[in-house]
Image (spheres, rainbow, N blue to C red):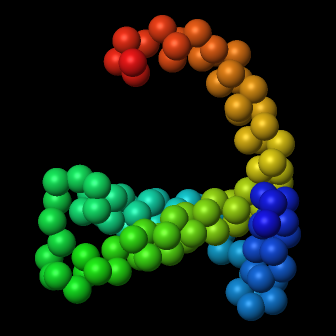
Amino acid sequence: MTIKEAQETVDQWINTIGIRYYGELTNTAILMEEVGEMARLMARIYGEQSFKRKEDEASAKEDLADEMADVLFVLVCLANQTGIDLTDALRKNLDKKTKRDKDRHANNEKLK
C-alpha cells in the first residue's frame, strides 16, 4: 500500500465505519496517547524497563506492530483532515534532510 492509498483507505474507513473524523485537536491528543503506548513497549522491549507480567513479554513485538499501526492511522487521519499529502510532504522532508545533512552525518565521529 502506498502512502496515497493509505490516506484514501483511511478516509474511506472513517467515512463509512467510523462515521466521521474526530476533531483535529482530539486526534492530536489521541496521537500523543498512541505514541505513549508505543514508547512504553519500546522501553520494555529495547530499553531497561521490565514487563510487569511474563505473558506481556510474549506478545510484545506483535503489540508493538499494532501500536505503530495505531500511530500511523491517527497521523493519516490528521493529514487527511488538514489537507496534507503525506507522499509530497515526506518527499520534501527527505529532500530538505538530504541537503542539510549530506556531510553532517558522514563527518560525525559518533556514527563511525
> How many marks are shown on the rendered structure?
0
Q: Is residue 89 left or right of residue 35?
A: right
Q: Quadrant of residue 93?
A: top right
The answer to whether any part of residue 72 appears in the image is yes
Residue 14, x across and y down, in percent: 75, 80
The vertical placement of 60 against 28, above or below, is: below
Q: Residue at x 70, y 16 (%)?
A: 99
- The quarter holding residue 38 reads bottom left
Query: Residue 82, can we see it?
Result: no
Residue at 84%, 66% (x, y): give it.
5
The percent coordinates of residue 81 (x first, y second) are 76, 62
Compared with residue 22, is residue 24 higher up or lower down, i.e. above or below?
above
As drawn, which residue projects farthest toward the front? Answer: 112
User: Where 42 sits versus 84, above or below?
Assistant: below
Front-most of 34 and 41? 41
Query: Where is residue 54 shown, x and y percent of the image?
Result: 17, 82
- What's the residue at 39%, 18% (across, down)? 112
* Left or right for 7, reference 52: right
Q: Position of residue 84 (x, y in %)?
A: 80, 50
Q: Quarter holding the N terminus?
A: bottom right
**Is residue 29 found left or right of 103 in the rendered image?**
left
Quick check: 87 above or below 61?
A: above
Direction from residue 30 to residue 73 in the image, left or right:
right
Q: Nearer the viewer, residue 57 or 93?
A: 57
Residue at left offset 17%, top offset 59%: 49
Observer-nearest of 8 and 47: 47
